[in-house]
Image: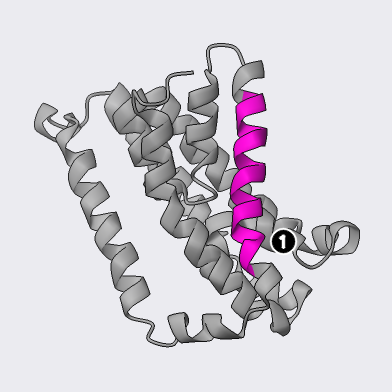
Amino acid sequence: MKGSIVIVLFLLVGILCGYYDFLPHTLTSGGWSFYALMALMFGVGLSIGNNPHLLRSFRHIKPILLLLPLATILGTLCASAIVGYLLPKTSVAEGMAIGSGFGYYSLSAIFVSGYRGAEAGTMALLANIAREIIALLAAPLLVRYFGRLAPITVGGATTMDTTLPIIIRYSGADYTIVSIYHGFVVDLSVPFLVSFFCSSLFIW
């Protein structure tokens, strides 16, 4: 939660700096987004490689639960396509690109901004921050009305880190490995799916 608030504050500061021309033009050019993206990708690889027990723990997951990330991805993409179709000035492709962030707001916002512009990037940032906040705040209600897997699917890519403590608290410690596996797989899908739906290969 604290991290999400900090991200929003930085966004607001950036908007103010850009609006009032506080920064030199060399810092406001698009090249810096690329370097920030490379740093984020390095961080993702570092966090995965720095946990030697992560891949070994996947052996203990029930076979049926291996399909949970696929269910999350397909459900999110279907809902995002519908929202993208219904919203004015938003295409199905943009809706699916934004939804493909799966709560990974920092990475998806940079990807979408680079491909579709600042407005779509801001939508991706806010939509995926909202997804994480909903997973954090609504976890007890999700468990009560939809079952113990619900907070995991809502959490998307964040279930490996940010929302994991909340999931353990309300879904139970026996869902820890499932949550980590789910977050790991969905997390890996983010750069590929966002790039695909933002590219000219998918123009609907």
| 114 w.r.t. 200: above or below | below
User: Residue drawn at (24%, 48%), measured in percent from left and top?
Assistant: 36
Q: Amino acid at mark 1?
A: Pro
Residue at the top extreme of this rendering: 88
- Confirm whether residue 13 shows in the render: no
Pinpoint residue 122: horizontal percent, then vertical percent. Answer: 44, 32
- Image quarter hosting the N terminus: bottom right
Residue 121 falls in image quadrant: top left
Q: Is 103 above or below relative to 63?
A: above
How far across and down, in percent of the image, does residue 131 sit? 62, 47
Label the magenta part by its dominant secondary structure: helix
Q: Residue furthest right?
A: 145
The residue carrying mark 1 is 151
Tell me what residue is drawn at x 49 percent, y 18 percent: 204
> For this rendering, which residue is in front, 130 or 21?
130
- Return the residue found at the far left: 26
Q: Tally the marks.
A: 1
The segment highlighted magenta reads: 66-83
Q: Position of residue 60 (x, y in %)?
A: 61, 85
Crowd rating for badge 1 (residues with CA inside 10 Å; few <14, some 14–19, many 20+): many
Indicate whether 66 appears above or below 115.
Answer: below
Q: Position of residue 96 (x, y in %)?
A: 53, 32
Q: Residue furthest front?
A: 63
User: Which residue is at 66% across, 74% downward?
Assistant: 63
Instruction: Report the side of 61 relative to 36 (left or right).
Output: right
**With 38 as the anchor, is 152 left or right in this view?**
right
- Residue 33 at least partly seen: yes
For numbered disc 1, what is the local secondary structure?
helix
The colour scheme of the drawn protein is: one colour
Res 10 → quadrant: top left
Magenta run includes residue 80: yes
What residue do we see at 68% from left, 78% from top? 62
